[in-house]
Image (cartoon, rainbow, N blue to C red):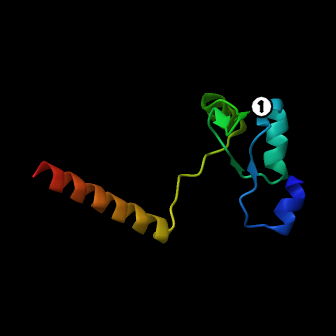
Amino acid sequence: MIGSARIVMPKAMVRLSAGRVRFSMAEQALCFLAGANSIFTGEKLLTTPNNDYDADQLMFKVLGLIPKAPSFSAEEEKACGCEAEHCQEAVSSSSG
């Protein structure tokens, strides 16, 4: 599945998510070799248990994988900036 997704959608983020707790580190490594390039991290995905953050960090280190830094689109950055401005306005008006 992962290899097929990578071939059909070469620029897509092919993400491993729920069910990774059942995969060993070696099995997850095979998923990355097949073309997976993203994971969901955190203790729970809605109602499904997920791998521990520290275990994921250890796996990355062992496999020599470097996590991609978060990036935001220009639209998201603009939205974040506006939200920050509104928060600042709210703080300024309530303290004065």
Nearer-the-camera pick, 67 or 17: 17
Residue at (71% x, 59% y) in the render: 13
Nearer-the-camera pick, 46 or 4: 46
* x then y, percent, for residue 70: 53, 53
For the question of whether residue 61 can be seen, the reply is: no
Residue 91 as seen in the image, left or right of residue 86: left
* x then y, percent, for residue 75: 48, 70
Residue 94 as seen in the image, left or right of residue 40: left
Nearer-the-camera pick, 69 or 17: 17
Residue at (41% x, 68% y) in the render: 78
* x then y, percent, for residue 27: 85, 36
Report the residue marked by disc 1: 21
Residue at (77% x, 31% y) in the render: 21
Q: Quadrant of the N terminus?
A: bottom right
Residue 32, above or below 72 = above
Question: Residue farthest to the front?
Answer: 94
Query: Of the residues shown, which amino acid type is indicated by label 1?
Result: Val
* x then y, percent, for residue 49: 72, 31
The residue carrying pointer 1 sits among few (fewer than 14), some (14 to 19) or many (20 or more) residues within 10 Å by Cα, namely: some
Residue 61 as seen in the image, left or right of residue 92: right
